[in-house]
């Protein structure tokens, strides 16, 4: 069987921005015969996510992330359908997912690495398994629950940076559902600001490219900030932390503004920001969703119910065709997406 795949053609370098030319589309052949324990899957949709930037380097800087190898097929989150199977865990026609799905139109995968999905959980919107009802949604829900200390009736204000991205857009809605009286999103365009307020129910949104963030933050959060869901790091996070209340909580989820730089993760804070954290007794602990997978099944069901009922709205930016994987990844890294960036490979 002739299939198309995307390989890593070159590395951007530790301090370089990724470019579409770092990826290359190739044709390859799959052997027709399956071994015991294997399944042939057809890829339906693939995900590109900020953490993948680390995998483009020789050293990811994280022991749980392996680097992509040059001239080898790239992998990440994917959803597909089983076309034939020689494993006991999945059968022809099953919809399945994996964290290590190769960027190929078809692939032979070990059944032990596939998780069977129930399309009814997402009313047939299978791409939601890569976002709101997948690892992204889990990160948002469990991040808020484990590190945010949101309490109904406590008159709390939450700020989310990278708020129009896959994770931030869900995290803000979770904060609102869990009891925050005010949820403010920071993002990079007026279109994103409108989506946050008009579609997702955020109290307000700040366009950091066009507006004075410290001034707007004071206007939008007149009683200070109690919970900060941090997806970006850098100067924006310094600004938010400076306006946080005593005994506030930073949910350290991502630092996308720093991913193209040769700095440790999480990147070091300025001395001024460190002093603010200490003086105000603000917690700031790195959140790793992989440490909470014992809570995943119940959390995913809860997310699916929120989505089905319309209490959580899902935003997606969908690009068609495996040949556009590199473009979609680079666009996502520059904030070109609203909500989850999905690449549709087949129907």
Image (spheres, rainbow, N blue to C red):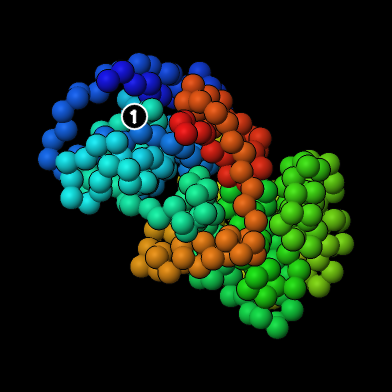
For the point 65% across and 70% down, which residue is it?
177
> Which residue corresponds to mark 1?
106
Please, which residue is most extreme toward the left here?
36
Question: Which residue appears at 13% of the width and 35% of the height?
Answer: 35
Choose top left, top right, bottom left or bottom right for residue 66. Answer: top left
Residue projecting furthest to the bottom: 153
Question: What x and y, as percent, mark residue 135?
Answer: 46, 54
Q: Quadrant of the N terminus?
A: top left
Residue 20 at least partly seen: yes
Q: Is residue 231 visible?
A: no
Q: Nearer the viewer, residue 165 or 260?
A: 165
Q: Is residue 197 above or below residue 144?
A: above
Could you tell me residue 325's position as x and y percent? 50, 28
- The residue located at (39%, 34%) in the rendering is 43
Residue 210 is situated, as x and y percent measured from the top left of the image, at 83, 41
Q: How many marks?
A: 1
Whether 177 is drawn above or below 62: the answer is: below
* In the foreground, 227 or 175: 175
Q: Locate residue 196 relative to residue 333 in the image: left or right.
A: right
Secondary structure, mark 1, is strand
């Amino acid at each position: 069987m002739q299939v198309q795949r995307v390989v890593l053609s070159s590395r951007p370098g530790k301090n370089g921005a990724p470019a579409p030319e770092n990826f290359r589309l190739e044709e390859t052949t799959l052997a027709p015969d399956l071994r015991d324990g294997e399944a042939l899957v057809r890829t339906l949709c693939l995900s590109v996510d900020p953490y993948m930037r680390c995998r483009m380097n020789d050293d990811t800087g994280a022991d749980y992330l392996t680097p992509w190898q040059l001239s080898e097929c790239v992998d990440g989150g994917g959803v597909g359908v089983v076309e034939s199977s020689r494993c006991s865990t999945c059968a022809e026609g099953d919809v399945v997912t994996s964290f290590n799905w190769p960027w190929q139109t078809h692939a032979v995968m070990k059944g032990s690495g596939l998780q069977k999905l129930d399309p009814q959980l997402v009313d047939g919107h299978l791409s939601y398994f890569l976002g709101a009802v997948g690892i992204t949604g889990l990160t948002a829900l469990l991040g808020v629950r484990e590190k945010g200390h949101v309490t109904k009736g406590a008159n709390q204000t939450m700020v989310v940076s990278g708020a129009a991205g896959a994770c931030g857009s869900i995290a803000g809605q979770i904060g609102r559902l869990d009891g925050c009286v005010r949820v403010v999103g920071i993002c990079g365009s007026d279109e994103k600001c409108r989506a946050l307020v008009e579609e997702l129910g955020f109290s307000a949104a700040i366009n950091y490219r066009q507006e004075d963030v410290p001034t707007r933050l004071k206007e939008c959060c007149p009683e200070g900030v109690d919970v900060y869901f941090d997806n970006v790091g850098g100067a924006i996070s310094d600004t938010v932390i400076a306006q946080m209340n005593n005994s506030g909580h930073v949910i350290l989820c991502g630092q996308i503004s720093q991913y193209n730089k040769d700095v440790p993760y999480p990147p070091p804070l300025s001395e001024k920001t460190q002093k603010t954290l200490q003086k105000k007794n603000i917690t700031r602990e790195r959140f790793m969703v992989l440490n909470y997978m014992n809570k995943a099944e119940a959390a995913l069901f809860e997310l699916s119910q929120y989505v089905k009922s319309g209490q959580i709205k899902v935003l997606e930016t969908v690009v068609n065709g495996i040949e556009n994987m590199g473009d979609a990844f680079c666009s996502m890294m520059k904030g070109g997406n609203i909500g989850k960036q999905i690449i549709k490979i087949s129907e």
